[in-house]
Image: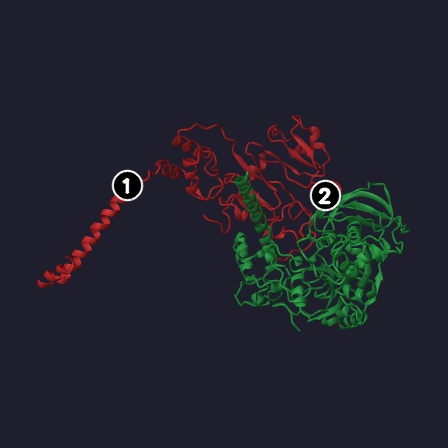
Chain colours: A red, B green
């Protein structure tokens, strides 16, 4: 049949054009049929809940949930049964809505905030040596490189945490210590992971009292390194009415489950290293300014 | 002369201290002896505060096979178990010892053993372990581990590393010049320790490898080794890093050690490399029962009044050593080790340990400004490991350290050649150190995962 067709069509005027159009139509029809068959027989059900959850999620792809972005988390919730509560920036609101989509119920969730457990800025922490090299805390704390700060526990002040924060919730203060802008903080934990010295921790937002030191050296050695480090004098432990603060391994540590934020230890601390955020929080909110160079 | 590929020729600066004979530095009044002066598990302290100790007494026992014993460098009283800084920057446990200045020797330490030439190979390894001997070139790997290769590896050569390719350092040179016979005896002990009991005595040969800038030592060695059948001295071209294990083996024997990523070790090509100081320490331990509690190190640099080579007790503070030779006000950086691979110290209280080959005080006035990589390829051309160092720094700039694994970051020996030749003054070795810190745990986790899977399949 094939050899006949071009001959007969070619007999008429302009037959070659017509022939081309015909061939394209036939190819189109055949491929269309194949696609139709494929969509008919190889169809998979896409769970519409994935789309719905994706709409609810903030879509900043911060990775705080532990998955490779919001889409991956949405799929994990639907197909792998991951918890609804993993989205840190979304908070309780998003959790409720995801749970609604999935038909599950939610429990109460404690809002958290990042706390920098070091108060030794350039004014109070002693410097041991100059530092020349890659300007990042991670680079400065790799074994084989000596710390520029006399305190081997404290903040290096090169801003890895500020760079890691995707929510403009951290700024570098003028004394070389990062400040947490608590109204922006969603407790995603990116700064916690970025800090090579494990200074930053997440604590309940309702707690106001924090110890700004993690130096586990003995008091004598702490004094050599920093004007305000915890010297493990135990005064805070003695005055605490609810047994919530203890000197563990030469440094005061607060048990946030017990702490009632009464602020007695703050007044007692001779080093001034226990702070009450009740006032400071207002202060920080007042001081809050757009981050230079940050996204709007 | 044949050599390895790559490398550089920094000014060697050895004239500052090469002609200064080894002098004994009096021990200070207080010493801080770290319990971790070696690669491996830290030693366990076996003395307490208030205990009386003597020179050479065991104060920290090895806490595993890859670990090393620590001995008291002075006689006196243990004041406290404390913490101090390792030159690497980490905090380690240490013993604070007050020196009574009498140098009372511990039992048997310093006694000449008349039968020392008949000691069996096994006893030599045991002695190295008991005396706490570690590689004194700087890596501080416990010597007894290196001297106990698995039976599947046939060692045929011991290379005594006297390249001393780092600029400024002259302590190995001085040891070879002043104590040639003792070092050769140490090499003989090393050869004997590695000769299997059933093998003929000449199975393992010993080579002392010297760089060509130390020709006087080479001629002396050649003269003394004339009638030996299995010992010889080799002259090598002057090039940094000639003293790096893999490069040394390539130059001396033309054998290529498999890289770190394939878990290659010198023993895979039948070689054990030891430092000159290690050989001497082994000789003194076997013959005089003297544990490793002091070492020779070079004090040099343009900010030192009288550079020289000193015999220093382990645990002496850096400050004490530097002041003994006069440190000038112009000093801006103090380096433990050589200028290429050494570590800039942030505290002068850091004690000297078994691996401190030199203490340099330099008055650097150079402004360290890092510029972008211009892909000139200088680092690639000079890399003695045939890596692409520029890749480490450009990946590091954007924080993609995990990808450095594909560029074999763990094969890097951190010799510093790339950073030395870089026209943009990029801190490539620092990027490599971060890269390794990121990649090694990833690789470990993967290996662990693989092992678990295999176990599951079999069990």
Q: Residue at image x 65%, y 49%?
A: A122
Q: Are marks 2 and 1 in contact (CB under 8 Å)?
A: no
* Count of all numbered marks drawn on residues in the image: 2
Mark closer to the chain start, 2 or 1: 1
Viewer-side residue, B83 vs A247: B83
Of the two numbered discs 2 and 1 in the rendering, the one whose residue sits closer to the viewer: 1
Mark carried by residue B40: none
Q: Residues within 10 Å of mark 1 (few under 14, many from 20)?
A: few
| Chain for disc number 2 | A
**Where does label 1 land, which residue?**
A41
Marks 2 and 1 sit apart, C-alpha to C-alpha, by 72 Å
Q: Residue at image x 45%, y 28%?
A: A106
**Is the residue B17 above or below the residue B439 in the image?**
below
Image quadrant in which you'd find residue A229: top right
**Where does label 2 land, which residue?**
A222
Q: Quadrant of the N terminus of chain B?
A: bottom right
Task: Say if residue A285 shows up in the picture.
Answer: no
Q: Residue at image x 51%, y 33%?
A: A111
Whether labels 2 and 1 belong to a single chain: the reply is: yes
**Is the residue A97 above or below the residue A139 in the image?**
above
Residue B95, percent from left and from top: 79, 45
Residue A226, percent from left and from top: 70, 45
**Is the residue A247 above or below the residue A227 in the image?**
above
Residue A11, percent from left and from top: 9, 63
Task: Say if residue A263 shows up in the picture.
Answer: yes
């Amino acid at each position: 049949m094939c050899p006949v067709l071009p001959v007969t069509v070619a007999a008429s005027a302009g037959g070659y054009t017509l022939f081309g159009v015909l061939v394209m139509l036939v190819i189109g029809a055949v491929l269309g049929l194949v696609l139709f068959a494929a969509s008919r027989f190889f169809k998979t059900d896409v769970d519409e809940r994935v789309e719905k959850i994706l709409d609810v999620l903030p879509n900043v792809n911060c990775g705080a949930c532990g998955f490779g972005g919001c889409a991956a988390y949405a799929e994990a919730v639907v197909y792998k049964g991951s918890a609804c509560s993993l989205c840190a920036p979304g908070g309780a609101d998003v959790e409720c809505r995801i749970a609604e989509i999935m038909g599950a119920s939610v429990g109460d969730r404690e809002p958290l905030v990042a706390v920098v457990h070091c108060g030794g800025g350039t004014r109070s922490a002693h410097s041991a040596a100059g530092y020349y090299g890659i300007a990042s805390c991670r680079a400065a704390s790799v074994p084989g490189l000596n710390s520029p700060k006399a305190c081997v526990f404290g903040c290096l002040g090169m801003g890895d945490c500020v760079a890691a924060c995707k929510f403009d919730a951290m700024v570098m203060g003028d004394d070389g210590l990062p400040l947490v802008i608590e109204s922006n903080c969603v407790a995603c934990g990116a700064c916690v992971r970025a800090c090579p010295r494990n200074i930053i921790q997440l604590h309940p937002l309702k707690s106001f009292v924090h110890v700004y030191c993690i130096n586990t050296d003995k008091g004598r050695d702490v004094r050599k390194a920093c004007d305000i480090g915890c010297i493990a004098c135990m005064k805070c432990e003695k005055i605490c009415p609810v047994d919530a603060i203890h000197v563990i391994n030469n440094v005061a540590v607060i048990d946030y489950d017990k702490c009632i934020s009464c602020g007695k230890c703050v007044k007692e601390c001779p080093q001034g290293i226990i702070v009450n955020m009740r006032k400071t929080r207002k202060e920080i909110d007042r001081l809050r300014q757009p981050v230079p160079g940050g996204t709007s | 002369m044949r050599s390895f590929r790559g490398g550089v020729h920094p000014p060697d600066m050895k004239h500052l201290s090469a002609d200064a004979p080894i002098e004994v530095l009096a021990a200070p009044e207080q010493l801080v002896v770290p319990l971790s002066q070696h690669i491996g598990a830290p030693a366990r302290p076996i003395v307490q505060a208030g205990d009386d100790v003597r020179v050479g007494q065991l104060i920290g026992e090895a806490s595993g096979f890859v670990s090393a014993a620590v001995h008291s460098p002075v006689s006196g009283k243990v004041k406290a178990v404390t913490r101090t800084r390792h030159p690497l920057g980490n905090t380690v446990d240490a013993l604070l010892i007050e020196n009574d200045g009498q140098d009372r020797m511990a039992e048997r330490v310093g006694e000449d053993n008349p039968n020392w030439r008949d000691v069996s190979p096994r006893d030599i390894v045991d002695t190295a372990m008991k005396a706490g001997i570690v590689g004194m070139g700087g890596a501080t790997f416990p010597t007894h581990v290196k001297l106990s290769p698995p039976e599947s590896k046939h060692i045929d050569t011991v290379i005594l590393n006297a390249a001393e390719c780092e600029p400024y350092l002259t302590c190995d040179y001085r040891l070879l010049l002043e104590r040639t016979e003792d070092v050769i005896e140490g090499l003989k002990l090393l050869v004997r320790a590695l000769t299997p009991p059933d093998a003929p005595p000449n199975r393992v040969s010993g080579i002392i490898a010297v760089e060509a800038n130390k020709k006087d030592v080479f001629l002396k060695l050649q003269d003394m080794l004339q009638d030996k059948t299995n010992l010889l001295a080799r002259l090598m071209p002057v090039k940094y890093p000639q003293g790096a294990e893999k490069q040394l083996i390539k130059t001396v024997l033309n054998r290529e050690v498999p890289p770190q990523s394939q878990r290659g070790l010198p023993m895979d090509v039948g070689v054990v490399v030891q430092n000159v100081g290690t050989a001497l320490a082994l000789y003194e331990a076997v013959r005089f029962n003297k544990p490793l509690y002091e070492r020779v190190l070079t004090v040099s640099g343009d900010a030192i009044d009288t550079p020289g080579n000193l015999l220093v007790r382990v645990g002496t503070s850096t400050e004490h050593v530097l002041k003994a030779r006069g440190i000038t006000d112009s000093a801006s950086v103090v380096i433990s080790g050589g200028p290429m691979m050494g570590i800039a110290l942030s505290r002068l209280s850091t004690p000297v340990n078994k691996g401190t080959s030199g203490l340099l005080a330099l008055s650097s006035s150079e402004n360290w400004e890092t510029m972008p990589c211009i892909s000139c390829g200088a680092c690639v051309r000079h890399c003695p490991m045939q890596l692409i160092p520029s890749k480490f720094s450009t990946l590091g700039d954007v924080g993609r350290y995990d990808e450095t694994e594909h560029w074999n970051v763990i094969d890097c020996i951190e010799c510093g050649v790339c950073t030395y030749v870089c026209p943009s003054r990029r801190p490539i070795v620092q990027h490599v150190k971060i890269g390794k810190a990121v990649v090694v745990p990833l690789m470990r986790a993967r290996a662990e995962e693989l092992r678990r899977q295999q176990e599951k399949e079999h069990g």
